[in-house]
């Protein structure tokens, strides 16, 4: 077994016990990156030289007898909408093709304090707008399990890199499912924390009331440790929670006796792939065997969540993307006057999906339509939140599929954006409510494609969903399976 196949917590122990060196580990992961990147195309920028230098610095520290932190010397990747000082941050858009941030996002400051090895920036849907990573301005990313299929989105590069072994861990962002859905499609663990649990300072904004940074990892243990590192209050983010941060790794026990699990009937809908429903229900029955209590619940406003999300998110996106005008920063396409220059810049340098969402958002916010669309969407968002509040009076966690289907084929949904939007049906409601959610691998489709179980928790109760996911994971071996690049389909 090569080093890239092992999770971070195992590699940490090997480094601490001097069984391997950080340089050896980094070279192994970079070699895997070289083997797979031509097919998977997970990365936009690879920082090879600085990665090796970071690894050598950690080896000197270990050689001197110093203790190392959990992530020290372990190679990972960062989604390309998280600002990294001195390294390009493009959001997979032509309009930011040469943008190099002069500062680090707060999560990067927290990570760098741990001295991990940063391998580079990974691909995504442009400005995080999409569910397949086909909307990148540079190239689509391919699912390591089946190269003609998508890895999910918008954090498709993050999930694909972890699944392929070209990163041990990664950071992504989740606005409507963008960590959890790729995690499901690529057979890795993906965690969207509670809104405000992790600072958004330095995350390039898509929809500010919905965006949240979170980890993608090989297993639940790694996800818990990564959340320990990036969680916490930040004065630079006014929406950041001041609640104390527990030790999430300490929450990982196999005991789920008496845990009350809610199954929302609205999440097991018509049109759901048969393999997904069968596999997810089998996973949930495992909890019953472990002593958990299964209750059917209702989240009656789920049917309105997609419509609500696709009014609120584009409205916030239209506002956030106003600054990309060819003047302040970013690329510029000249024109005969200021108006023509701005028009040329935005028309030629924003992709089709970004332009579509800006137009939807501006329409929803425009005079005469604000009350009919945006204001009404905010009211329905409150109803969605209230559904969860009522449900959590009866249960400790809610379980459902992460996505209604396994990974679909590249190009299959590009001509029908509405079909692609419906892929978010199981993930979007959590973002509207600001709740934490986690996707853990729970099996495969008849074609060998990964399927994820989604575990939803109360606000700021990541510890319980991590515990529930860990208990299930210990009964299975799906997290040990590495993607066989290419696969059979």
Image (tube, grey):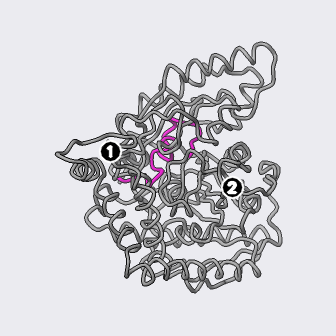
Name which quarter of the figure residue 332 lies in: top left
Crowdedness near tag 1: few (<14), some (14–19) or many (≥20) residues, C-alpha within 10 Å:
many
Dot 1 or dot 2, earlier in sequence:
2
The residue that mark 1 highlights is: 326
Q: What secondary structure is marked by label 2?
A: loop
At 28% from the left edge and 47% from the top edge, which residue is drawn? Answer: 349
Residue with the most extreme left position: 336
Q: Is residue 209 magenta?
A: no
Q: What secondary structure is marked by label 1?
A: loop
Depicted 358 relative to depicted 127: above or below: below
What percent of the width, then of the height, locates residue 346? Answer: 29, 51
CA separation in Å, label 1 and label 2: 31 Å
The residue that mark 2 highlights is: 240
Depicted 375 relative to depicted 49: above or below: below
Nearest the eye: 297 or 245: 245
Residues in magenta? 149-171
- Indicate which label's residue lies in the foreground, 1 or 2: 1
- The answer to whether one can see residue 1 in this image is no
Depicted 17 relative to depicted 440: above or below: above
């Amino acid at each position: 077994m090569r080093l890239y196949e092992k999770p971070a917590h195992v590699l940490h122990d090997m480094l601490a016990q001097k069984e391997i060196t950080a340089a050896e580990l980094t070279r192994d992961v970079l070699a895997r990156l070289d083997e797979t990147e031509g097919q998977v195309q997970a990365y936009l920028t690879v920082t090879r030289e600085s990665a090796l230098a970071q690894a050598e610095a950690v080896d000197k520290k270990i050689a001197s007898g110093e203790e190392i932190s959990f992530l020290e010397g372990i190679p990972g990747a960062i989604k390309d909408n998280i600002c990294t000082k001195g390294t390009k941050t493009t959001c997979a858009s032509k309009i930011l093709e040469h943008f190099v941030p002069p500062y680090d996002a707060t999560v990067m400051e927290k990570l760098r304090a741990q001295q991990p090895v940063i391998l580079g920036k990974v691909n995504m849907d442009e400005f995080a707008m999409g569910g397949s990573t086909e909307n990148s301005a540079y190239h689509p990313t391919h699912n390591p399990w089946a190269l003609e299929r998508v890895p999910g989105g918008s954090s498709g590069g993050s999930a694909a890199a972890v699944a392929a072994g070209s990163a041990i861990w990664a950071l992504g962002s989740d606005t409507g499912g963008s960590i959890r859905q790729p995690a499901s499609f690529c057979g890795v663990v993906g965690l969207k924390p509670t809104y405000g649990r992790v600072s958004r300072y330095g995350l390039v904004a898509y929809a500010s009331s919905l965006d949240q940074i979170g980890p993608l990892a090989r297993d639940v243990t790694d996800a818990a440790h990564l959340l320990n590192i990036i969680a916490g209050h930040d004065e630079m983010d006014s929406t950041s929670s001041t609640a104390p941060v527990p030790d999430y790794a300490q929450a990982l026990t196999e005991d789920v006796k008496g845990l009350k699990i809610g199954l929302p009937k609205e999440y097991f809908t018509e049109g759901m792939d048969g393999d997904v429903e069968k596999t997810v229900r089998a996973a949930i029955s495992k909890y019953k065997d472990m002593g958990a209590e299964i209750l059917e619940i209702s989240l009656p406003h789920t049917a309105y969540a997609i419509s609500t999300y696709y009014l609120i998110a584009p409205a916030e996106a239209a506002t956030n993307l106003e600054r990309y005008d060819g003047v302040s920063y970013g690329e510029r396409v000249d024109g005969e006057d200021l108006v023509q220059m701005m028009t040329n810049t935005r028309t030629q340098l924003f992709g089709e999906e970004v332009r579509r969402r800006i137009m939807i958002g501006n329409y929803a916010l425009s005079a005469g339509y604000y009350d009919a669309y945006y204001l009404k969407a905010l009211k329905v968002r409150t109803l969605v939140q209230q559904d969860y509040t009522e449900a959590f009076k009866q249960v400790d966690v809610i379980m459902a599929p992460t996505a209604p289907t396994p990974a679909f084929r590249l190009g299959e949904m590009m001509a029908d954006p509405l079909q692609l939007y419906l892929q978010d049906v199981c993930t979007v409601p959590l973002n509207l409510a600001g709740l934490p959610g986690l996707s853990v691998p729970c099996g495969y489709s008849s074609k060998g494609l990964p399927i994820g179980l989604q575990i939803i928790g109360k606000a700021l109760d990541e510890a319980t969903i991590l515990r529930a996911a860990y208990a299930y994971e210990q009964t299975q071996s799906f997290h040990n399976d590495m993607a066989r690049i290419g696969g059979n389909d």
